[in-house]
Amino acid sequence: MAYAAQFSFGVFLPYMEADTGWDRELLTRAFAVYVFMYAFLSSVSGRLTDRFGPRPVILVGGCLLGAGYWLLSQVHSKWELFVVLGAVAAAGMSATFVPCNAAVMRWFVRYRGRAIGLATIGASLGNLTAPPLVALLIGAIGWRATMAWIGISVTAVIVLAAVFMVRDPSDMGLLPDGDELGASTTPAAVDEERGWTLAEARRTSAFWIITAIFFFTWLVVFLPIVHLAAYAMDLGFDALKASWILSSIGLGGVIGRPLVGAVSDSSGRLPALAFVLGTQVVVFVLLPYTDSWLMLCLEAFGFGFGYGGTTTLFPAMVGDHFGRRSTGAIVGFIFSISGSSAALGPWLAAYVLGLYGSYDLAFWFGAAVNCVSLLLIPVLRWAEPALGAVRVAD
Protein backbone atom coordinates (compact mmCIF):
# COMPACT_ATOMS: atom_id res chain seq x y z
CA MET A 1 0.00 0.00 0.00
CA ALA A 2 2.80 2.40 0.88
CA TYR A 3 4.60 1.91 -2.41
CA ALA A 4 1.39 1.84 -4.46
CA ALA A 5 0.74 5.37 -3.24
CA GLN A 6 4.33 6.48 -3.77
CA PHE A 7 4.71 4.99 -7.25
CA SER A 8 1.48 6.64 -8.41
CA PHE A 9 2.85 10.14 -7.91
CA GLY A 10 4.06 10.28 -11.51
CA VAL A 11 0.48 9.76 -12.74
CA PHE A 12 -0.70 12.73 -10.66
CA LEU A 13 1.99 15.10 -11.97
CA PRO A 14 0.28 16.42 -15.14
CA TYR A 15 -3.06 16.84 -13.35
CA MET A 16 -1.55 18.66 -10.37
CA GLU A 17 0.41 20.83 -12.79
CA ALA A 18 -2.73 21.77 -14.73
CA ASP A 19 -4.88 22.34 -11.65
CA THR A 20 -2.49 24.35 -9.49
CA GLY A 21 -0.38 26.08 -12.11
CA TRP A 22 2.79 24.85 -10.39
CA ASP A 23 5.42 23.64 -12.84
CA ARG A 24 6.85 20.13 -12.90
CA GLU A 25 10.15 21.21 -11.38
CA LEU A 26 8.40 22.56 -8.26
CA LEU A 27 6.26 19.45 -7.84
CA THR A 28 9.22 17.11 -8.23
CA ARG A 29 11.25 19.29 -5.85
CA ALA A 30 8.56 18.70 -3.22
CA PHE A 31 8.73 14.96 -3.98
CA ALA A 32 12.52 15.14 -3.64
CA VAL A 33 12.15 16.67 -0.16
CA TYR A 34 9.76 13.83 0.72
CA VAL A 35 12.24 11.18 -0.47
CA PHE A 36 15.14 12.79 1.38
CA MET A 37 13.21 13.13 4.62
CA TYR A 38 11.74 9.63 4.67
CA ALA A 39 15.15 8.12 3.96
CA PHE A 40 16.79 10.34 6.58
CA LEU A 41 14.15 9.47 9.19
CA SER A 42 14.66 5.75 8.52
CA SER A 43 17.62 5.84 10.89
CA VAL A 44 15.14 6.81 13.62
CA SER A 45 12.54 4.22 12.66
CA GLY A 46 15.28 1.57 12.53
CA ARG A 47 16.43 2.25 16.08
CA LEU A 48 12.82 2.34 17.29
CA THR A 49 12.18 -1.01 15.59
CA ASP A 50 15.14 -2.60 17.41
CA ARG A 51 13.85 -1.21 20.70
CA PHE A 52 10.07 -1.66 20.47
CA GLY A 53 9.60 -4.10 17.60
CA PRO A 54 8.03 -3.45 14.18
CA ARG A 55 4.37 -3.48 15.27
CA PRO A 56 4.05 -0.06 16.99
CA VAL A 57 6.44 1.62 14.55
CA ILE A 58 4.53 0.45 11.47
CA LEU A 59 1.17 1.22 13.09
CA VAL A 60 2.09 4.86 13.80
CA GLY A 61 3.76 5.13 10.40
CA GLY A 62 0.64 3.92 8.60
CA CYS A 63 -1.48 6.57 10.31
CA LEU A 64 0.99 9.32 9.40
CA LEU A 65 1.39 8.15 5.81
CA GLY A 66 -2.35 7.96 5.20
CA ALA A 67 -2.85 11.36 6.82
CA GLY A 68 -0.14 12.79 4.57
CA TYR A 69 -1.84 11.66 1.36
CA TRP A 70 -5.26 12.81 2.55
CA LEU A 71 -3.83 16.22 3.42
CA LEU A 72 -2.10 16.33 0.04
CA SER A 73 -5.55 16.24 -1.56
CA GLN A 74 -6.38 19.47 0.29
CA VAL A 75 -3.29 21.59 -0.51
CA HIS A 76 -3.73 24.94 -2.25
CA SER A 77 -0.42 26.65 -1.51
CA LYS A 78 3.20 25.75 -2.12
CA TRP A 79 4.20 25.73 1.55
CA GLU A 80 1.38 23.28 2.32
CA LEU A 81 2.67 20.98 -0.42
CA PHE A 82 6.17 20.90 1.05
CA VAL A 83 5.01 20.45 4.67
CA VAL A 84 2.52 17.69 3.89
CA LEU A 85 4.87 15.72 1.64
CA GLY A 86 8.17 16.53 3.34
CA ALA A 87 7.06 16.13 6.94
CA VAL A 88 3.82 14.16 7.46
CA ALA A 89 3.98 11.68 4.54
CA ALA A 90 7.76 11.34 4.83
CA ALA A 91 7.58 10.46 8.53
CA GLY A 92 4.99 7.80 7.75
CA MET A 93 6.93 6.32 4.84
CA SER A 94 10.07 6.03 6.98
CA ALA A 95 8.24 3.40 9.03
CA THR A 96 7.72 0.98 6.13
CA PHE A 97 10.86 -0.26 4.34
CA VAL A 98 13.23 -0.51 7.31
CA PRO A 99 10.91 -2.01 9.98
CA CYS A 100 9.47 -4.59 7.59
CA ASN A 101 12.85 -5.69 6.22
CA ALA A 102 14.40 -5.72 9.69
CA ALA A 103 11.71 -8.18 10.78
CA VAL A 104 12.29 -10.46 7.78
CA MET A 105 16.06 -10.36 8.36
CA ARG A 106 15.53 -11.59 11.91
CA TRP A 107 13.33 -14.47 10.81
CA PHE A 108 15.63 -15.83 8.08
CA VAL A 109 19.35 -16.58 7.71
CA ARG A 110 19.91 -19.35 5.11
CA TYR A 111 16.91 -18.28 3.03
CA ARG A 112 17.29 -14.56 3.66
CA GLY A 113 17.46 -13.51 0.00
CA ARG A 114 14.44 -15.57 -0.98
CA ALA A 115 12.41 -14.37 2.02
CA ILE A 116 13.17 -10.68 1.47
CA GLY A 117 12.43 -11.10 -2.24
CA LEU A 118 9.02 -12.59 -1.50
CA ALA A 119 8.15 -10.09 1.22
CA THR A 120 9.10 -7.07 -0.87
CA ILE A 121 6.97 -8.22 -3.82
CA GLY A 122 4.35 -6.03 -2.16
CA ALA A 123 6.19 -2.90 -3.28
CA SER A 124 6.27 -4.06 -6.90
CA LEU A 125 2.66 -5.26 -6.81
CA GLY A 126 1.74 -1.72 -5.77
CA ASN A 127 3.77 -0.37 -8.67
CA LEU A 128 2.09 -2.87 -11.03
CA THR A 129 -1.55 -2.36 -10.07
CA ALA A 130 -1.88 1.18 -8.71
CA PRO A 131 -0.94 3.49 -11.64
CA PRO A 132 -3.67 2.28 -14.09
CA LEU A 133 -6.24 2.24 -11.29
CA VAL A 134 -5.22 5.73 -10.21
CA ALA A 135 -5.38 6.98 -13.82
CA LEU A 136 -8.95 5.63 -14.14
CA LEU A 137 -9.99 7.12 -10.80
CA ILE A 138 -8.55 10.52 -11.66
CA GLY A 139 -10.51 10.48 -14.90
CA ALA A 140 -13.69 9.63 -12.99
CA ILE A 141 -13.48 11.69 -9.77
CA GLY A 142 -10.48 14.01 -10.17
CA TRP A 143 -6.99 13.95 -8.71
CA ARG A 144 -7.92 15.44 -5.32
CA ALA A 145 -10.64 12.91 -4.51
CA THR A 146 -8.39 10.09 -5.72
CA MET A 147 -5.56 11.27 -3.47
CA ALA A 148 -7.94 11.43 -0.50
CA TRP A 149 -9.10 7.85 -1.06
CA ILE A 150 -5.48 6.72 -1.29
CA GLY A 151 -4.83 8.25 2.13
CA ILE A 152 -7.80 6.50 3.73
CA SER A 153 -6.94 3.14 2.14
CA VAL A 154 -3.26 3.33 3.12
CA THR A 155 -4.07 3.91 6.78
CA ALA A 156 -6.69 1.16 6.96
CA VAL A 157 -4.55 -1.57 5.38
CA ILE A 158 -1.20 -0.75 7.04
CA VAL A 159 -2.72 -0.48 10.52
CA LEU A 160 -4.41 -3.86 10.04
CA ALA A 161 -1.19 -5.45 8.76
CA ALA A 162 0.84 -4.02 11.65
CA VAL A 163 -1.22 -6.02 14.16
CA PHE A 164 0.26 -9.27 12.83
CA MET A 165 3.94 -8.23 12.88
CA VAL A 166 6.30 -10.13 15.22
CA ARG A 167 9.85 -8.90 15.70
CA ASP A 168 11.81 -12.10 16.23
CA PRO A 169 11.18 -15.88 15.97
CA SER A 170 12.47 -16.29 19.53
CA ASP A 171 9.45 -14.24 20.69
CA MET A 172 7.37 -17.25 19.66
CA GLY A 173 9.85 -19.91 20.79
CA LEU A 174 11.06 -20.52 17.24
CA LEU A 175 14.35 -20.50 15.34
CA PRO A 176 15.20 -18.67 12.09
CA ASP A 177 14.37 -20.34 8.76
CA GLY A 178 11.63 -22.43 10.34
CA ASP A 179 14.12 -24.72 12.11
CA GLU A 180 12.61 -26.72 14.94
CA LEU A 181 13.74 -26.63 18.54
CA GLY A 182 15.25 -29.99 19.44
CA ALA A 183 16.51 -31.66 22.59
CA SER A 184 20.05 -30.55 21.81
CA THR A 185 19.10 -26.93 21.17
CA THR A 186 20.57 -24.53 23.72
CA PRO A 187 19.67 -20.89 24.45
CA ALA A 188 22.93 -19.95 22.71
CA ALA A 189 21.68 -21.59 19.51
CA VAL A 190 18.56 -19.43 19.56
CA ASP A 191 20.78 -16.34 19.71
CA GLU A 192 23.05 -17.59 16.92
CA GLU A 193 24.16 -14.96 14.40
CA ARG A 194 23.15 -12.04 16.63
CA GLY A 195 25.97 -10.09 15.07
CA TRP A 196 27.27 -6.55 15.23
CA THR A 197 26.04 -3.35 16.79
CA LEU A 198 25.76 -0.25 14.62
CA ALA A 199 28.85 1.25 16.23
CA GLU A 200 30.89 -1.89 15.46
CA ALA A 201 29.61 -2.10 11.90
CA ARG A 202 30.50 1.51 11.16
CA ARG A 203 34.15 0.74 11.88
CA THR A 204 34.38 -1.69 8.94
CA SER A 205 35.25 -0.76 5.36
CA ALA A 206 32.51 -3.07 4.03
CA PHE A 207 29.86 -0.96 5.78
CA TRP A 208 30.88 2.17 3.89
CA ILE A 209 31.38 0.40 0.56
CA ILE A 210 27.86 -1.05 0.78
CA THR A 211 26.62 2.44 1.61
CA ALA A 212 28.43 3.88 -1.44
CA ILE A 213 27.14 1.19 -3.83
CA PHE A 214 23.52 1.87 -2.96
CA PHE A 215 24.07 5.62 -2.69
CA PHE A 216 25.05 5.81 -6.37
CA THR A 217 22.43 3.45 -7.79
CA TRP A 218 19.65 5.06 -5.73
CA LEU A 219 20.62 8.53 -6.95
CA VAL A 220 18.41 7.86 -9.96
CA VAL A 221 16.07 5.15 -8.70
CA PHE A 222 13.03 7.47 -8.68
CA LEU A 223 13.85 9.14 -12.00
CA PRO A 224 11.91 6.59 -14.12
CA ILE A 225 9.25 6.05 -11.46
CA VAL A 226 8.39 9.75 -11.28
CA HIS A 227 9.04 10.83 -14.87
CA LEU A 228 8.40 7.93 -17.27
CA ALA A 229 4.63 8.46 -17.28
CA ALA A 230 5.05 12.18 -17.97
CA TYR A 231 7.78 11.37 -20.54
CA ALA A 232 5.38 9.04 -22.36
CA MET A 233 2.61 11.66 -22.31
CA ASP A 234 5.05 14.22 -23.72
CA LEU A 235 5.67 11.75 -26.57
CA GLY A 236 1.94 11.75 -27.32
CA PHE A 237 0.61 8.72 -25.43
CA ASP A 238 -2.54 9.10 -23.32
CA ALA A 239 -2.58 8.89 -19.50
CA LEU A 240 -3.76 5.26 -19.38
CA LYS A 241 -1.03 4.07 -21.75
CA ALA A 242 1.53 6.08 -19.80
CA SER A 243 0.36 4.50 -16.54
CA TRP A 244 0.92 1.03 -18.01
CA ILE A 245 4.58 1.94 -18.47
CA LEU A 246 4.80 2.50 -14.72
CA SER A 247 3.01 -0.81 -14.21
CA SER A 248 5.70 -2.47 -16.32
CA ILE A 249 8.22 -1.33 -13.70
CA GLY A 250 6.09 -3.10 -11.12
CA LEU A 251 5.84 -6.28 -13.18
CA GLY A 252 9.63 -6.34 -13.53
CA GLY A 253 9.94 -6.04 -9.77
CA VAL A 254 7.36 -8.77 -9.10
CA ILE A 255 9.50 -11.15 -11.15
CA GLY A 256 12.90 -9.74 -10.21
CA ARG A 257 12.61 -9.55 -6.43
CA PRO A 258 11.95 -13.24 -5.62
CA LEU A 259 14.09 -14.50 -8.51
CA VAL A 260 17.15 -12.38 -7.66
CA GLY A 261 16.70 -13.09 -3.94
CA ALA A 262 16.53 -16.86 -4.45
CA VAL A 263 19.44 -16.93 -6.90
CA SER A 264 21.58 -14.84 -4.55
CA ASP A 265 21.09 -17.40 -1.75
CA SER A 266 22.88 -20.00 -3.86
CA SER A 267 25.14 -18.07 -6.25
CA GLY A 268 26.11 -15.19 -3.95
CA ARG A 269 24.92 -11.63 -3.43
CA LEU A 270 27.66 -9.86 -5.42
CA PRO A 271 27.20 -11.66 -8.78
CA ALA A 272 23.46 -11.08 -8.48
CA LEU A 273 24.06 -7.42 -7.65
CA ALA A 274 26.37 -6.99 -10.65
CA PHE A 275 23.69 -8.43 -12.95
CA VAL A 276 20.86 -6.17 -11.77
CA LEU A 277 23.03 -3.04 -11.79
CA GLY A 278 24.14 -3.90 -15.32
CA THR A 279 20.49 -4.26 -16.34
CA GLN A 280 19.79 -0.74 -15.10
CA VAL A 281 22.75 0.64 -17.07
CA VAL A 282 21.38 -0.88 -20.28
CA VAL A 283 17.90 0.56 -19.65
CA PHE A 284 19.16 4.11 -19.05
CA VAL A 285 21.34 3.93 -22.18
CA LEU A 286 18.34 2.86 -24.33
CA LEU A 287 15.75 5.34 -23.02
CA PRO A 288 16.97 8.44 -24.95
CA TYR A 289 16.54 6.53 -28.22
CA THR A 290 13.05 5.20 -27.52
CA ASP A 291 9.76 6.63 -28.80
CA SER A 292 7.80 3.37 -29.07
CA TRP A 293 5.23 2.56 -26.37
CA LEU A 294 6.08 -1.15 -26.49
CA MET A 295 9.80 -0.49 -26.14
CA LEU A 296 9.16 1.90 -23.24
CA CYS A 297 7.20 -0.88 -21.52
CA LEU A 298 10.02 -3.38 -22.09
CA GLU A 299 12.64 -0.95 -20.80
CA ALA A 300 10.47 -0.11 -17.81
CA PHE A 301 10.17 -3.85 -17.13
CA GLY A 302 13.98 -4.14 -17.23
CA PHE A 303 14.37 -1.22 -14.86
CA GLY A 304 11.81 -2.72 -12.47
CA PHE A 305 13.67 -6.04 -12.55
CA GLY A 306 16.95 -4.28 -11.72
CA TYR A 307 15.47 -1.93 -9.12
CA GLY A 308 13.56 -4.75 -7.44
CA GLY A 309 16.68 -6.88 -7.36
CA THR A 310 18.86 -4.17 -5.80
CA THR A 311 16.34 -3.36 -3.06
CA THR A 312 16.04 -7.08 -2.26
CA LEU A 313 19.81 -7.56 -2.08
CA PHE A 314 20.42 -4.49 0.11
CA PRO A 315 18.97 -5.80 3.41
CA ALA A 316 20.15 -9.33 2.61
CA MET A 317 23.75 -8.10 2.21
CA VAL A 318 23.54 -6.11 5.43
CA GLY A 319 22.20 -9.15 7.29
CA ASP A 320 24.92 -11.39 5.86
CA HIS A 321 27.68 -9.01 6.90
CA PHE A 322 26.45 -7.82 10.28
CA GLY A 323 23.93 -10.37 11.57
CA ARG A 324 20.56 -10.04 13.30
CA ARG A 325 21.47 -8.16 16.46
CA SER A 326 20.87 -4.56 15.27
CA THR A 327 19.14 -5.05 11.94
CA GLY A 328 16.89 -2.03 12.26
CA ALA A 329 19.63 0.37 13.32
CA ILE A 330 22.15 -0.75 10.67
CA VAL A 331 19.71 -0.95 7.75
CA GLY A 332 18.14 2.33 8.86
CA PHE A 333 21.48 4.13 9.12
CA ILE A 334 22.71 2.97 5.69
CA PHE A 335 19.32 3.70 4.13
CA SER A 336 19.27 7.19 5.67
CA ILE A 337 22.44 7.98 3.70
CA SER A 338 21.99 5.92 0.53
CA GLY A 339 18.24 6.37 0.24
CA SER A 340 18.49 10.13 0.74
CA SER A 341 20.39 10.35 -2.53
CA ALA A 342 17.20 9.27 -4.35
CA ALA A 343 15.83 12.75 -3.74
CA LEU A 344 18.15 14.12 -6.43
CA GLY A 345 17.03 12.05 -9.43
CA PRO A 346 13.44 13.32 -9.96
CA TRP A 347 14.42 16.95 -9.39
CA LEU A 348 17.47 16.63 -11.66
CA ALA A 349 15.36 15.19 -14.47
CA ALA A 350 12.83 18.03 -14.18
CA TYR A 351 15.64 20.60 -14.13
CA VAL A 352 17.28 19.07 -17.21
CA LEU A 353 13.89 19.01 -18.97
CA GLY A 354 13.32 22.68 -18.23
CA LEU A 355 16.84 23.60 -19.34
CA TYR A 356 17.14 21.54 -22.53
CA GLY A 357 13.58 20.44 -23.30
CA SER A 358 14.67 16.79 -23.11
CA TYR A 359 15.27 14.04 -20.54
CA ASP A 360 18.24 12.62 -22.46
CA LEU A 361 21.00 14.05 -20.26
CA ALA A 362 19.22 12.78 -17.13
CA PHE A 363 19.02 9.28 -18.61
CA TRP A 364 22.75 9.32 -19.43
CA PHE A 365 23.45 10.41 -15.87
CA GLY A 366 21.43 7.41 -14.66
CA ALA A 367 23.62 5.06 -16.69
CA ALA A 368 26.82 6.69 -15.39
CA VAL A 369 26.06 6.46 -11.67
CA ASN A 370 25.02 2.82 -11.99
CA CYS A 371 28.39 2.17 -13.64
CA VAL A 372 30.04 3.67 -10.55
CA SER A 373 28.12 1.21 -8.35
CA LEU A 374 29.23 -1.64 -10.60
CA LEU A 375 32.88 -0.63 -10.24
CA LEU A 376 32.56 -0.70 -6.43
CA ILE A 377 31.52 -4.37 -6.34
CA PRO A 378 35.11 -5.71 -6.73
CA VAL A 379 36.17 -3.30 -3.97
CA LEU A 380 33.54 -4.79 -1.67
CA ARG A 381 34.69 -8.31 -2.56
CA TRP A 382 38.21 -7.30 -1.56
CA ALA A 383 36.94 -5.89 1.76
CA GLU A 384 34.82 -8.91 2.67
CA PRO A 385 37.60 -11.21 3.98
CA ALA A 386 38.39 -8.65 6.67
CA LEU A 387 34.97 -9.33 8.14
CA GLY A 388 35.33 -13.10 8.26
CA ALA A 389 32.36 -14.83 9.83
CA VAL A 390 29.58 -12.72 11.24
CA ARG A 391 30.44 -11.72 14.77
CA VAL A 392 28.38 -13.40 17.47
CA ALA A 393 27.42 -11.36 20.49
CA ASP A 394 28.61 -12.44 23.90
Image (tube, grey):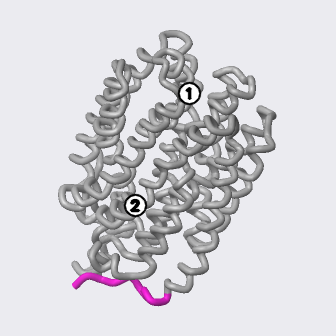
Residue 66 visible at all = no
* Disc 1 element: helix
Residue 387, compared with residue 232, is above or below; it is below
Q: Earlier along the polypeptide chain: callout 2 or callout 1? A: 1
The residue lying furthest to the front in this view is: 355
Does residue 326 show up magenta in the picture? no
The residue lying furthest to the top in this view is: 140
With 9 as the anchor, is 255 left or right in this view?
right
Q: Name the residue: 51% across, 31% down.
A: 8
Identify which amino acid the numbered label 2 is placed on.
Answer: Ile
> In the image shown, does 330 or 254 lie closer to the viewer?
330
Q: Name the residue: 50% across, 49% down.
A: 344
> In the image shown, does 298 or 203 lie closer to the viewer?
203
Q: Main secondary structure of the magenta part?
A: loop
> In the image shown, does 334 or 313 lie closer to the viewer?
334
Residue where numbered disc 1 is placed: 11
With 62 as the anchor, is 343 left or right in this view?
right
Identify which amino acid the numbered label 1 is placed on.
Answer: Val
Residues shaded magenta: 385-394
Percent x, y of residue 214: 51, 63
Q: Counting other residues with Cα less than 10 Å from the Cα at mark 2, is it few (<14), some (14-19), or many (20 or more)?
A: some
Q: Which quadrant: the N terminus?
A: top left
Q: Quadrant of residue 85?
A: top left
Q: Quadrant of residue 271?
A: bottom right
With 343 as the anchor, is 269 left or right in this view?
right
Q: Which quadrant: the C terminus?
A: bottom left
With 39 as the anchor, is 255 left or right in this view?
right
Residue 59, compared with residue 280, is above or below; it is above
Residue where numbered disc 2 is placed: 337
Percent x, y of residue 128: 58, 36
